[in-house]
Image (cartoon, rainbow, N blue to C red):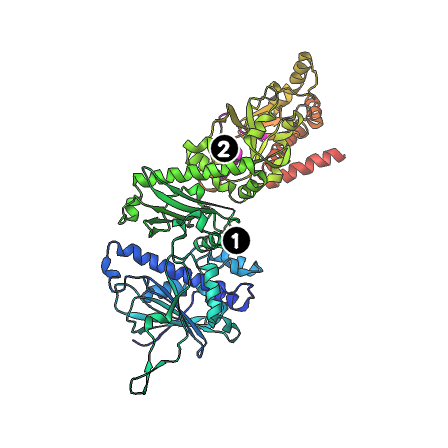
Amino acid sequence: MSEEQLSFQAEVSRLLDIVAHSLYSNKEIFLRELISNASDACDKLRYLAVTDGDLMKDDPDFRIDLEIDSTANTLTISDNGIGMNRQELIDNLGTIARSGTSAFMEQMESSKDGSNLIGQFGVGFYSSYMVADKVSVTSRRAGEDQGWQWDSDGKGKFTIAEVEKPMRGTSITLHLKEEQKEFSEELRLRTIIKTYSDHIPIPIRLKKASPENETAENEDGSIENTPEDNEAEWETLNSASAIWTRSKSDVTDEQYKEFYHHVAHAYDDPWLREHFRVEGVLEYSGLLYIPGSKPFDLFHPDRKHGVKLYVRRVFITDDCQELIPAYMRFLKGVIDSEDLPLNISREMLQDNPMLRKIRGGIVKRVLGILEKKAENEQEEYLKFWENFGSVLKEGLYEDLPQKDALLKLCRFKSIKTDSWISLADYLEKMKEGQEHIYYISGEDEQALRRSPQIEGFKAKDVDVLVLHDPVDEFWVTSINEYEGKGFKSVTRGGADLNKIDSADDKDDSSKDKEEDKAELGALLGYMKLTLEGEVKDIRSSERLTDSAVCLVADEGDMDIHLERILRSHKQVDEASKRVLEINPKHDLVKRLSTLIKEDGAAKELEDIAWLLLDQARILEGQIPSDAATFAQRMSRVMGKGLS
């Protein structure tokens, strides 16, 4: 078969251009990425060989080999893992199948040091072009006879051709750029491997520079060349033992950190690590990390879990959704079980009771660690919360048995402070007579802080939680209470502020209050007739102090912000009618109460009633139902005021 020329996917061409023409402070990471890929290829074959031993019977010992050709200025990285066939070479090297490519490109282009992004997005292979102007990949998939060669200079096209390859696996040959000759030096490679890849549980070997043939003198005095033994030409550079199987005292902080870089495909430092072994009815060990920064695809639906499952050091899967709950998808690392069957399939994992017990143990361990951090290192804990708090809160409705533990870990903003507070902090400062934990929810934190619905709470010095994560609407409706206090939205009716004591409350007599109600009654009755069908009810408000009006959900109705979210996802067809609350102490409302007694004021009152409703809608982030009519009414009322 002749050589075939193909074009890169558009995103790959763009990526290669960025890699080749950007300056990176840490070019050596290309070797870490290629070795990590080689290790993964060996892991995949080891897993498949559990059920099909023929795949590796001809070459049972895994290895990753490095070879230098100083004359040709090349570096070759070879493995005897799963290998690739023609289509896999095209799919894996010619396209970026993983979602989130656009976001990756944006971060690459804006990052001062793009090397900390390579690998996170499944594109580690392309880091080769930081040091090479041409890359050749020769591969043969285990179980197949035909080998294939992929070649490209990274400038838009690549070629595929059939080749003879006696053994399975993949060899990547980098034709190094003239200014990158340092990566063809043995000492430089040894240093890189020790720094980044010492933890890889597969021998990484370096082929020594070929020595001159040794000579030996025969008995007759003649000289005979003695070729060196082939095995002696290879030097193993790494310790080649699974780091999670070692004792904690045998692993340095630097080794822990580099394993995190390997398993997380990240270049930040981990915020926390947990190395443990569980013995008893179930035996398993683990090395888990919480990253120090938030991945770009944390909320992407195609995101894989970051914890690999092993069974007795044999890799099983890196996408076991049953191992770690979705609300802990920020975790990276390894879990290695002694009890799961070695031939377990991914389908069997879904209903395996042992796996469920391991999952439960991991959840309790992680929550326990976070609780200690929150109690003993509050400022440090807030770094975690700002990165992953939105994800952790998903557990409040996904994992109800852990509700209490999760609520203790939650941190919130509130109208009385710009810093984070816990629910325990909130309860400690509740007012006399306060029966609920009040909250307001929406998309914009600053807009929520200015909402008219919290005016009465501010006047009473009652704190209100500001919930601005989309997930908040879902957990808060499924959690009834915390420490005996129920959660209540300030945008709902029934927020009885009269029961809450306040030093600022005036000693209004009941007679005065009755007079106020009588004066307001006629206005409310008129507005109900005018706005009939547009609102559910019109009521006097206890929550307003500065604003004239606001919209609230009636007691028992869906919260306004939650309904807006569901409507945007087409899960609710029609908007519910809301209650319009009127502030009886506002100057405008007082004037309207007087105006309604005057003859000929009906048309003006009708316009004002509609304008007040549209004003309340605008405050809720909505638009007037009829913009043209709204403008006409506004013009009439303004004209009347100027006359």
Residue 579 visible in the current orientation: no
Label 2: few (<14), some (14–19) or many (≥20) C-alpha neighbours in 10 Å: some
- On the rendered structure, is 146 left or right of 507? left
Please name the amino acid that badge 2 sits on. Answer: Leu
Asked which quadrant contains residue 434, the reply is: top right
Tell me where residue 174 appears, x and y as whole percent. Answer: 43, 71
Please name the amino acid that badge 1 sits on. Answer: Asp
Q: Nearer the viewer, residue 447 or 486?
A: 486
| Mark in the foreground, 1 or 2 | 1
Tell me where residue 101 appears, x and y as whole percent. Answer: 47, 57
Q: Which residue is mark 2?
A: 407
Position of the C terminus, as image quadrant, is top right
Instruction: State the residue at coordinates (28%, 56%).
Output: 48
Q: Is residue 629 above or below residue 146?
A: above
Tell me where residue 526 appears, x and y as whole percent. Answer: 61, 23
Q: Nearer the viewer, residue 82 or 121?
A: 82
Residue 570 visible in the current orientation: yes
Q: Which residue is mark 1?
A: 268
